[in-house]
Amino acid sequence: MGRLFGTDGVRGVANADLTAEMALGLSVAAAHVLAEAGTFEGHRATAVVGRDPRASGEFLEAAVVAGLASAGVDVLRVGVLPTPAVAHLTGALGADLGVMLSASHNAMPDNGIKFFARGGHKLADELEDRIETVYEEHRRGEPWERPTGAGVGRVRSYDEGFDRYVEHLVGVLPNRLDGLRIVLDEAHGAAAGVSPEAFRRAGAEVVTIGAEPDGLNINDGCGSTHLDPLKAAVVEHGADLGIAHDGDADRCLAVDHTGAEVDGDQILAVLALALREQGGLRSDTVVATVMSNLGFKLALEREGLRLVQTAVGDRYVLEEMKEHGYALGGEQSGHVIILDHATTGDGTLTGLLLAARVARTGRSLQELASVMERLPQVLINVPDVDKSRVTTSADLAAAVADAERELGATGRVLLRPSGTEPLVRVMVEAADIDQARSVAGRLADAVKSALG
């Protein structure tokens, strides 16, 4: 069996790959594994369960709740809330486990299950592996001890979760947003309620788009993966800025008053300077992945800040931050982690803090984001090659060395094997787009020749 858990939980097409039976079985297995690990020792176990608005989330939530309760875990159903809200409430309520049903930015037919440990942190890899093992044992008919009578879990709705999360978000802000007009694109997703409420409570005048989820329209032509509607709305309404989330609102991308995109690297740069000014940027360090634009690194160096880079994936960014106590990290895609206030990427929190910086400085988002210049970036996928030899081919190493010499200090080359397909991704950055395309094309040919 291939590993069920990916970098962000278990995902698949709902009712095909990810079935009600699987959701129930994984929940039972998670309860047993955490009990074995001593998480529930000395008290009655409690779990927080939330979901995004996907239609499939309704039956998957029912399956998860049934599985947990059948294993003796009390369940607090918080309903439709963002992933970071479930993580926050897991910690704030002292729950032993959090479960979020979402496939984030994926299309509506997909769904996923993500587990959080006590405190709202991602489960350790070894616990996920053990959950898979126990799930398979139960699926093959291995008996398990089932509580009866008063031992079964109780289920209740926790409607206070909405207000508690919004209060947390607004309470984090260093200043109010009075005087700002902000367009929010909620991707017809999990933040359609909490994000506009939080921005309004913070003082902003709010215009919403993509905020009418019907279970079928999540991420459909809107949100952080489709910025054109937000760009048009910002210009149409004369807004100061726009904020876009994905389906589960752990991402944030932005648009300035002219309709120009402000990506995750630029957001990180703006927030890094704000945190340093407030004395909250520990070790003057920001954590990002190797896919961050070279312009981001050059901007931080110019500002006297240090960049630590990790493998692609917000889980690796978070691991590096937790290990060394860094306060800020994220990805170009808009996953931004402010570790003093969240245990995962939080798109609403990120957007609020970005808007707070605009309000506090009196400078436009366009001006603030100009702290970094995005260098032209070209990405070519080279399929049907032996990706395992990327780091061992002498011919390929020579081609990369030639490219790096040509680009000098204002360019960068990255060759990365895909984690899921038989292909190699060639990424080239340069001060000039034509040079970036030329070098990327030559390197793609070199990958085909050396690894084909």
Image (tube, rainbow, N blue to C red):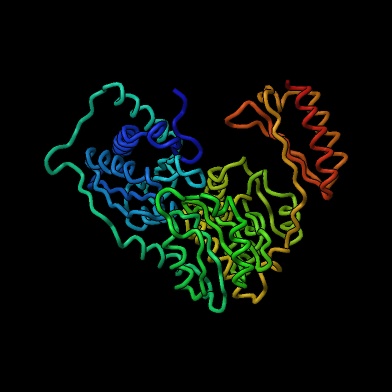
Residue plotted at (72% across, 36% down):
380
- In the picture, the quarter occupied by the C terminus is top right
Can you see residue 448?
Answer: yes
Q: Is residue 410 visible?
A: no
For this rendering, which residue is in front, 187 or 405?
187
Return the x and y of residue 339 as percentages of the image width and height. 51, 56
Query: Dividing the picture into quarters, in which one does residue 451 lie?
Result: top right
Residue drawn at x 46%, y 69% is: 170
Residue ranking furthest to the left: 149
Relative image position of residue 198 (x, y in whole percent) = 45, 68
Question: For this view, does 38 lie left or right of residue 225?
Answer: left
Identify which residue is drawn at 41% across, 65% down.
Answer: 166
Q: Is residue 254 above or below residue 26?
A: below
Q: Residue 82: x and y, percent?
A: 43, 54
Residue visible at 43% across and 33% down? 126
Q: Looking at the picture, does residue 101 appear above or below residue 336?
A: above
